[in-house]
Amino acid sequence: MPRTSPLLPSSDNHHHHAYSKSEKTKRPFPSATFTTATRPLIAFSIFCLIVGISGTVFSLLALSSHHQSPPVFRCGRVQDSFRGHYLSSSASSSHRKVGDHMNVVDRPKFLGFVGIQTSFGFADRRDALRSTWFASSPDSLLRLEQATGLAFRFVIGRSKDAKKMAELSREVDQYKDFMLIDIEEEHARLPSKTLAFFKAAFELFDADYYVKADDDIYLRPDRLATLLAKERTNPMTYIGCMKKGPVITDPKMKWYESQGHLVGNEFFLHAYGPMYILSAEVVASLATARNNSLRMFSNEDVTIGSWMLAMNVHHEDNRAICDPQCTPTSIAVWDIPKCSGLCNPATKLKELHQISLCSKSPTLPPDEDDDR
């Protein structure tokens, strides 16, 4: 993956002359002919001068607007605003000195990368997360990474709505906690977004595990780190709150599955969608999959589950990932099965954070008898 660096303005060393030295010694034309012939030349020269001045002004404006936009670390069309923020700062430990330039490590190593899936219109959820368990500034995000060995980013695609993109750009510039991926943000395209997320995360981060989490759950990063630090005998691991369920074939009902006829009456074992974890070996296989080579079901968690069924993975069922209330062992809390996440998350996140058992209880060591 190529390393990007800030663009530096360059000067133009090509100078245009009206005539060469040899032309100075040429015999001049008669005055009448000279006057008639040079009128178009003078007009053309004035035109070129105007174009040159306009181009210079445009270049200056373009450079000015470039410096006003939020810095990002790019890999193809994927952007990491957090590392972009530290491109011009030596405060981050993820930098290395090369010559006279400071460069960000291409794929920093983490125990896990956690992508918080979000969308346009959910700024209130992100604000609530930043005021509870998520970091509220680039410095606090860095401290969270150093304390847990986990990297956290909000993950979002793009929109054709210029106003939405402008609002997102301001939020990215303020908090620097986004990973922007190259896909249209639509609810109907969640399976495609999820695949794009795993591919992008694998490109940008060298992690032992990749975590997909929604923006409407209460998470304990310290307990998640403890879970991921466990020794496992199978490198191909799929961790989540596993379930089966009826296939909904009525298009008027929630969780309708348009390809239900391929499955039957009951779905195969798969993890609930608000949060699940894939090991690096699993994500590496997904990252190399060709576009349109994997079947996309209507529901994202079923889609991932179908891929896991086709791969030789170990299904690790962990109910601490889908706890309906805060307990000493809760990793993620949400209103299962009432809502696919927390009901009214912007308010509920703050309420849960006030409960000591949610936010301040100690992290328990892993149970050696857990399923591996």
Image (spheres, helix red, strand yellow):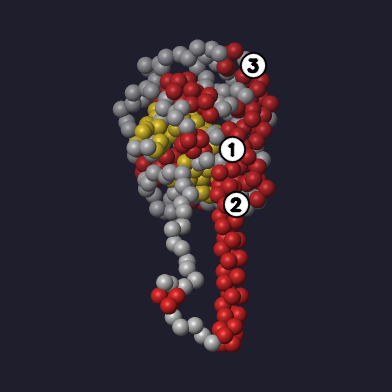
Q: Residues within 10 Å of mark 2 (few under 14, many from 20)?
A: few
**N-terminal-most mark, 3 or 2:** 2
Q: Tell me residue 249's x, y (percent).
A: 59, 48
Vertical arrangement, residue 26 with respect to residue 313, above or below? below
Residue at 40% x, 75% y is 22
Write down the residue under mark 2.
Answer: 61
Residues at discs 2 and 1 in contact (Cβ within 8 Å): no
Q: Quadrant of residue 97?
A: top left
Secondary structure found at label 2: helix
**N-terminal-most mark, 3 or 1:** 1
Identify which amino acid the numbered label 3 is placed on. Answer: Gln
Is residue 314 visible in this depiction of the protein? no
Write down the residue under mark 1.
Answer: 173
Indicate which label's residue lies in the foreground, 2 or 1.
Answer: 2
The residue nearer to you, when weighing 235 against 111, is: 111
Is residue 329 visible in this depiction of the protein? yes
CA distance for labels 3 and 2: 48 Å
Write down the residue under mark 3.
Answer: 354
Compared across the picture, whether 338 is left or right of 96 comes to: right
The residue nearer to you, when weighing 222 against 217, is: 222
